[in-house]
Image (tube, rainbow, N blue to C red):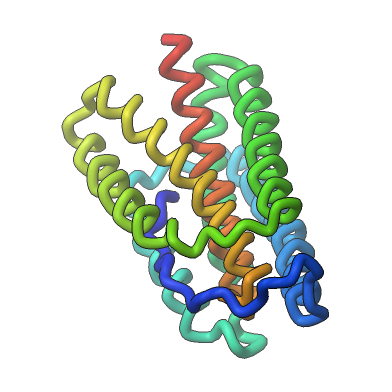
Amino acid sequence: MNDNTSLTRSKPAITSTALSPEVSKVLRSTYMLLGVTLTFSAAMAVVAMMVNAPYFGLWTLLPYFLCLWMVEKNKNSSAGLLWVFALTGWMGFTLGPILNYYLAAKGAEPIVTALGATALVFFAASGYVLTTKKNLSFMGGFLMVGMLVAFVAGIANVFLEIRGLSLAVSSAFALISAGVIMWQTSAIIHGGERNYISATVTLFVMIYNLFISLLQLIGLSED
């Protein structure tokens, strides 16, 4: 689900190499919730695959943006957690039909390859920022514009069905998703993000986008 999540955050609040207790707490909470939501989303994808759920196309965006809006509205309360699971569960469920398509058309290899590549990119991008502690706040505006352009192009190509544009959009989303993962991690460690619910949702959506984009690229390369 390609997202135009806001990439505007406050300026960095720390300059030392050691992470403050507050930053460490946000990081721990974010990665714990991210791990749980990824597991839950994967379970929902399996359920969708088992029941052979249909592909809803662009209609998947309506519940997606509703849940995304409710997460943002309730991010400072326990209700925000419920909406996080509603969002990630829905995204996992709508992933099921896509996985069934690839399994039927190309087998499990593209899925496994995309999954492995997604994990590699996520850990490499996050690890780089956590190790170097670089301030990447300057990337926010560029990533937002790139995300919006890629999102609009992707919607347009649903109707145009141009192979070259599909390749370009998938490549753009893969690169932008990796960039947002780095940017969001930097925002946490430099004090620009103090809400672990918001941080988790941003990282989750980017991991999802990255996986889908890589899966599409692998699929296109095999056609």
Figure disc tally: 0
Residue 27 figure quarter? bottom right
- The one nearer the camera, 107 or 54, is 107
**Residue 82, visible in the rendered structure:** no
Q: Is residue 129 left or right of residue 138?
A: right
Q: Position of residue 177 (x, y in %)?
A: 49, 46
Question: As drawn, which residue projects farthest toward the front?
Answer: 16
Residue 107 spot, x, y in % from top left: 60, 16
At x 81%, y 69%, the residue is 18
Nearer to me, 204 or 18: 18
| Residue sitting at the far top | 223
Residue 76 placement (x, y as % from top left): 60, 88
Using residue 95 as the reference point, say whether residue 120 is left or right of it: right
Q: Is residue 128 above or below residue 40?
A: above
Residue at the far left: name it: 160
Residue 164, image quadrant: top left
Asked if 77 appears above or below 34 in the picture, the reply is below
Residue at 53%, 85% (x, y): give it: 74
Q: Where is 194 relative to 35, above or below?
A: below
Q: Is residue 98 left or right of residue 107?
A: left
Q: Give the answer, above or below, for where 223 lies relative to 118.
A: above
Residue 84 location in percent, x, y? 60, 70
Where is the C terminus found, in terms of image quarters?
Answer: top left
Any part of residue 31 in sight: yes
Q: Residue at x 50, y 16 (%)?
A: 105
Residue 212 vs residue 26: left or right? Answer: left
